[in-house]
Amino acid sequence: MPASPSLVTSETAPEPKTAHSSRIGLIVPSSNTTMETELPELFGRQSEATGHRYTFHSARATLKNVTREELLAMVAKAADCATAVSDADVDVIAYACLVAVMAQGPGAHVDSESVIAQAASDNGHPAAVASSAGALVRTLHELGAARVAMVAPYMKPLTKMVSDYIEGSGITVVDSASLEVADNLAVGCLDPGALPAIARDLQREGADAIVLSACVQMPSLPAVQAVEDELGLPVVTAATATAYEVLKALGHTPAITGAGRLLSGALVPTAAQAG
């Protein structure tokens, strides 16, 4: 269901902060074309269910090819991006590049989130912070998913790095599919309609959940509910996990339809109540 333009706006249509609206800051790779479409779509559905309004305000860091060198260079710009996006007095900042954080080694999301939070605070606009890397592993733990099967768009060495990072957090990756697309802009052009067949081919025996897109750039939202309904396992993506943690940071109960049980609020009954 398309987001209503009256409920989700962008930095081109600012509005005063009120008890019934929230500002979400995004830090994204310069070539990302997906998070600024999937997150507003998700929060549009949340708005339709609750009446709460959300606006999005982005800062970009250069990234064209998903290589370790470019990923580390992007990470070095995180604090500057946090300072820039916090100028909009956002309530929460989502650091939306999963693999850039994971490329730094196990547990790196903790330091990355701390750096971004400190930069925003030093700029006079403190904000909660959720990285997509941290959101994914924390959400899987919250779901009790000790074993997962995963789809990633990366070249095989980067997929292995993501798998190792997830396993370093105590979650076993029972199988993974690598789509082997190095150009980040090309990743954003992948067809989410292909994901159900890819997920169907994963070895899922003993898995507790499916990570349908271990990348915030690979479009997956149109396939999440279909894969969950067909395969009977909870389906999470980097984007849905990030949306979930943003809602938690704001104190809002998930009420999003058509994006899996996680964002419907059905899987995690302890989620914070909406204000």
Image: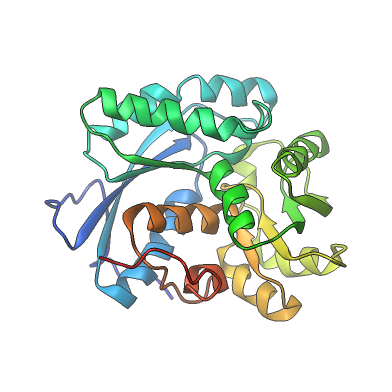
Which one is nearer the viewer's eye here, 156 or 104? 104
Which one is nearer the viewer's eye here, 264 or 1? 264
Q: Is residue 142 left or right of residue 2?
A: right
The residue located at (75%, 55%) in the rendering is 150
Q: Position of residue 152 (x, y in %)?
A: 72, 49
The image quadrant of residue 194 is bottom right
Q: Position of residue 222 (x, y in %)?
A: 57, 68
The residue located at (65%, 66%) in the rendering is 235
Q: Position of residue 107 (x, y in %)?
A: 63, 33
| Image: 257 above or below 215 | below
What colouring style does the render use? Answer: rainbow
Residue placed furthest toward the front: 270
Q: Quadrant of the N terminus?
A: bottom left
Asked if one can make out residue 181 in the rendered structure from this viewpoint, the answer is no
The image quadrant of residue 120 is top left
The image quadrant of residue 100 is top right
Q: Quadrant of the C terminus?
A: bottom left
Q: Is residue 228 left or right of residue 94?
A: right
| Image: 119 above or below 59 | above
Asked if one can make out residue 240 in the rendered structure from this viewpoint, the answer is yes
Q: Is residue 154 left or right of residue 71?
A: right
Q: Position of residue 97 (x, y in %)?
A: 54, 38
The residue located at (62%, 61%) in the rendering is 236
Which one is nearer the viewer's eye here, 111 or 69? 111
